[in-house]
Image (tube, grey):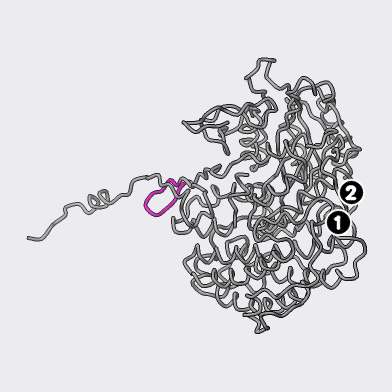
Amino acid sequence: MSLQLEDPRVIEFDVRTDEMLVNMGPQHPSTHGVLRLLLKTDGEIVSEVTPHLGYLHRCAEKIGENLAPQQWIPYTDRMDYLAGMNMNLGWALAVEKLIKMEVPEKAMVLRVAIAELGRIASHLVGMGAYGLDLGTFSPFLYAFREREIILDLFEEACGARLTYSYLTIGGATHDLPEQITIPPGLAALTGHKMDLSLSWIEACLIFLEWLEKRIFEYHTLLTRNQIFIKRTAGLGVMSRDMAIDYGCTGPVLRGSGVDHDLRRDGEKIYTRMYEGYTFDIPVAPFEVAPPEVILGDNWCRFFVRMKEVNQSIGLVRQALARYPKAEGTYRVPFKMATKLPKGEAYLETECPRGQMGFYVIGNDAANPLRARAKSSSFCNLSVTGPLCAGCLIADIPAIVGSLDVVMGEIDR
Amino acid sequence: MTSAEIHQALVAKFGEKITGANLEALDPWIEVAPAAIVDVAEFLKTEPALAFDALNNLCGVDYFEADPKKAAKFGHEPHVEVVYHLYSYTHRHWLVIKVKTPRWQDGAPGQLPDVPSVAGVWAIADWHEREAYDLVGINFVGHPNQRRILCAEDWVGHPLRKDYEFPLEYHGIRGR
């Protein structure tokens, strides 16, 4: 006996999907830490995304009010733990702005070299983890192999591998080492002898030369990969106005076609560090983009980061060439009991994830009246709701991953 | 535009709603009456010569010294400020706007002070105001979705208030 349907619409009624609430996270691997996304779904289509934050909240701003500015430096690198150097620099510059401190040339050159190396390390993780979000494992392994060498170099300079507290108020805690043994990873990769003794600058230059050739391979592995393009191009499109309205900064903003980088357009106290250096600011749209790409989509944001790595390599080289001849010392002393003058200073710096702002209010005491950290990832994440509405569940990791957020910085 | 010109433009438009300014400060700031903040924000964003299209930062500051021994040297009247750091991508200029309110509405401790919400002007203000409400304890009138963002939803108190006391326990977890 065969089944006969009198009215075919009956069966359509039966398979209609229901609206369902799905929790994505806080332990989901593609949410970059402990972010919980509450999805309102209908089948595979997501109609509403609500981010829930605060799982890493420790109220760092309250801690900052009870510590001298120097003592808060270790807390800043625990915010964005993938770019600790850049975070240290942001807070140090904000305090220097308030107390009107002049930093010698040598310290500024050192800061440029270290901050740009930190940017490379951060973008490498961003690239590797993004590949992981989209289901490819190899770029992640390569990215971490390269980042490992940068961490080795940072370890030689300051003793720490993740939470550096190296760039501090007045300069840096130590000078770059004169004599080191080549990091074993670098020796193995480049075919040098394991016990080779050389200066930190030489080791760094060997690494940069090796890294520069690898960037091309990443582009063949990810950027030009058809599966990768299918997953990223034309998805998560953010217009210029939307990016500005939601306070997006950094590669997210430049991926939407706004030509703005604080290293060039920022306040004097920050831009004077980069005076005399030649570097480009990669901004979407790109001529080399595949035809599927739309201005402001996932692919653009990813490609801005990849291009910035090349620029940072150039900046580190220029800084290292200046370093031996630079005048002054690596640090001006700053006493812990220094009273912060009455007044306030707000300064944003270009961190790998965007414009990180620090706001410090002094009141004739060693501890600031208010220490505020405006997180760039916090603003970049705020756009997920409007950006993800109407997409497929499988595209959410691709969109959130392209924003490259770090939850430690969002939750502070 | 320089901050002095912006100040003149605002005074010409809003008169006595602009209650003060410090144009010699490191970051020149202009103080606005709480009731006028939404109009001023709209004006700053839409006026072509100003075009402050980006809200870089919004935060609350609690000016208060809880220790009575240090209060005499504190140098500020107890009050709460909301600070808006604005930036224009068109003209590449900065501005700081401040709104001052009493620490508690009508002087009744525990009653959060009211400040109109600018979430309708800049979309990012939504999250920044939620954070300021959560941590500093400011009631943003007209906010579309004012609930805690960083602390747990059943958290008591506002941690960045200077007289905040850490809870003894939270769901059976010892606090101090």
**A352 or A211, which lies in front?**
A211
* Residue at the far front in the pictured view: A195
Type of residue at label 1? Arg
For the question of whether residue A283 can be seen, the reply is no
Specify the quadrant of the image occupied by residue B43. Answer: top right
Q: Are marks 2 and 1 on the same chain?
A: yes
Does residue B143 sit above or below A298 in this rendering?
above
Whether residue A200 is visible to the viewer of this picture, yes or no, is yes
Q: Which residues are magenta?
A: A39-48
Residue A151 is marked as none
Q: Residue at x 68, y 83 (%)?
A: A192
Compared across the picture, whether A193 is left or right of B150 comes to: right
Location of residue B68 by image quarter: top right
Question: Secondary structure beneath disc 1?
Answer: loop
Which residue, given by chain and number where applicable, does mark 1 sit on? A331
Instruction: Name the residue that disc number 2 marks.
Output: A101
**Residue A391 screen position, x and y as percent:** 47, 55
Q: Earlier in the sequence, mark 2 or mark 1?
A: 2
The location of residue A129, given as percent across then percent down, is 55, 63
Residue A128 vertical position relative to residue A244 in the rendered view, above or below: below
Q: Main SS of the magenta segment?
A: strand
The x and y percentages for residue B5 are: 90, 39
> Which numbered mark, 2 or 1, is in the foreground of this view?
1
- Which chain is indicated by disc 1? A
- The N terminus of chain A, quarter of image: bottom left
Q: Nearer the viewer, residue A404 or A371?
A: A371
Question: Numbered disc 2: what chain?
Answer: A
